[in-house]
Image (spheres, helix red, strand yellow):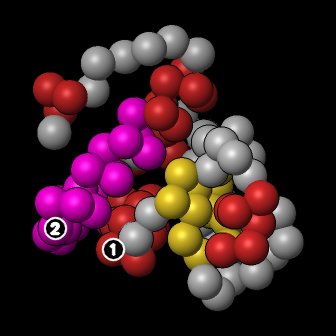
Amino acid sequence: MRLLCILGLTPNSKQCVSCGENEEISYFSIKEDGFKCNVCGKQDTSAIAMSKSTVNAIQYTITAPAKKLYAFQIKDNALEEFKLITKLYFNEKLEKEYKLEELF
């Protein structure tokens, strides 16, 4: 995710990309490049549901100083969500399928 940010492909992680809501964020839209709220996420069949831990992990990865990038822990289920979102977003933005499993 951080690599994509460096390349200028930072997803919108501050608010819902559809309505601008910044509360109850619980979906990630690959096609619309960012977070969606509960209402908008349920209307978008391609949006991926995610836990609050995953939301926090994505926000941290995008904004943390480079030296502190790996200074957080994430539970297994949130890590799986984070991996899935990162892989799909990476593949969509770079228009090619990459094998990212080795990185995690």
In magenta segment, residue 68: yes
Any part of residue 70 in sight: yes
Disc 1 secondary structure class: helix
Residue extending furthest toward the top: 96
- Asked whether the beta carbons under mark 1 and mark 2 sit within 8 Å of each other, the answer is yes
Stretch in magenta: 63-87
List the residue tagged with mark 2: 75
In this picture, residue 90 sits left or right of residue 32 = left
In this picture, residue 85 sits left or right of residue 83 = right
In this picture, residue 17 sits left or right of residue 48 = right
In this picture, residue 101 sits left or right of residue 10 = left
Q: Position of residue 11 (x, y in %)?
A: 61, 52
In magenta segment, residue 98: no
Q: Position of residue 90 (x, y in %)?
A: 47, 31
Q: Main secondary structure of the magenta part?
A: helix
Total of numbered circles in the picture?
Answer: 2
Q: Position of residue 3 (x, y in %)?
A: 41, 38
Q: Amino acid at mark 2?
A: Lys
Any part of residue 3 in sight: no
**Which mark, by number, is residue 53?**
1
Q: Quadrant of residue 73?
A: bottom left
